[in-house]
Amino acid sequence: MFDTDLLHVFVTVADSGGFTRASEILNSTQSTVSAQVRRLEEQVGQPIFARSTRNVQLTAAGETLLGYARTILRINEDARQKLDGATPTGRIRIGASEDLTGAWLPRVLKNYVSRFPGVTIDLEIGIGPQLMRKLDDGELDVMVAGRCAGDDADGWRLWREPLVWMFARERELPMPLQLALFPEPCPYRDAAFRALSAMGGSRQEWTIACTSSSLAGVRAAALAGIAATPLPRSLAGGDLRIVAASSEELPLLPDVEYVAKVGQRANSPAVAALMDTVQAAAGPVIA
């Protein structure tokens, strides 16, 4: 049986992305947190974090343990609340990228509020890097957003799906290629630039035809046949088609990796309950 105190420390390190931030959240020291993780690794019998000088990443064993740890802690907390007659209350500040607002985010919020009606939600929709800065500045408690696989950033990984080119159905791409993009900083924009710059042939010629800070804006440009836009595959459908990169002379794009991250001092029961709900809903919702 694993020590629940050690499991709590482990989940905090995984959610915050490092021992230093976890120690701040737990009001402890980095050496104490490291020692507690080592004790848990002794109980597990193998490493649960792959440590480097820049950050920590979960090992395969750590990924497996994280799901069980959340379940164990949730059951433990549910039992405590039932016996105490208490449920999480207060206000929680959530930041989410706009590509999650179609189906995934409403499902998470519905499940969360149905369980914890006493929690008030402040919701901010934006672009991942901007939300990350607000989280680091203490303006958000939890952030959920997409980043391109391989980008150096911490957070708890939820799921991956392809980043693809999208354009109006039954329309041919314009020549030279026209793009509809989110403004900087944006991981999808950067990924498109890197892929196009690394590609040979005529499709190296491209221009930005539309810049919009909203998903509705770049979708509108694509639906109008003005420009192609790079978006996660789960957003395709209706009159917006996925462009076959190989047959239409466009470069392949990297996967989108959705991550959740908790603020340094966001250690309330309401935040813990939200992370449980997010973890349970991990996975794209295809329209």
Image (spheres, helix red, strand yellow):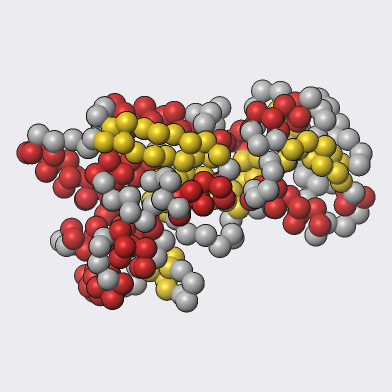
Residue placed at 41% from the left, 61% from the top?
17
- For this orientation, the residue located farthest to the left is 83
Left or right for 115, reference 283: left
Residue placed at 33% from the left, 50% from the top?
266
Q: How many marks?
A: 0
Residue placed at 26% from the left, 36% from the top?
90
- 153 relative to 282, above or below: below
Residue placed at 17% from the left, 41% from the top?
78
Q: How far from the left and from the top, in percent, is residue 72?
A: 21, 50
Q: Is residue 58 visible?
A: no
- 1 relative to 191, above or below: below
- 217 relative to 41, above or below: above
Q: How far from the left and from the top, in percent, is residue 185?
A: 65, 50
Q: How far from the left and from the top, in percent, is residue 14?
A: 37, 59
Q: How far from the left and from the top, in percent, is residue 106?
A: 44, 28
Q: Nearer the viewer, residue 266 or 100?
A: 266
Q: The N terminus lies in which quarter of the figure?
A: bottom left
Left or right for 132, reference 227: left
The part of the image, by quadrant, that contains residue 231 is top right
Q: The C terminus lies in which quarter of the figure?
A: top right
Q: Is residue 93 visible?
A: yes
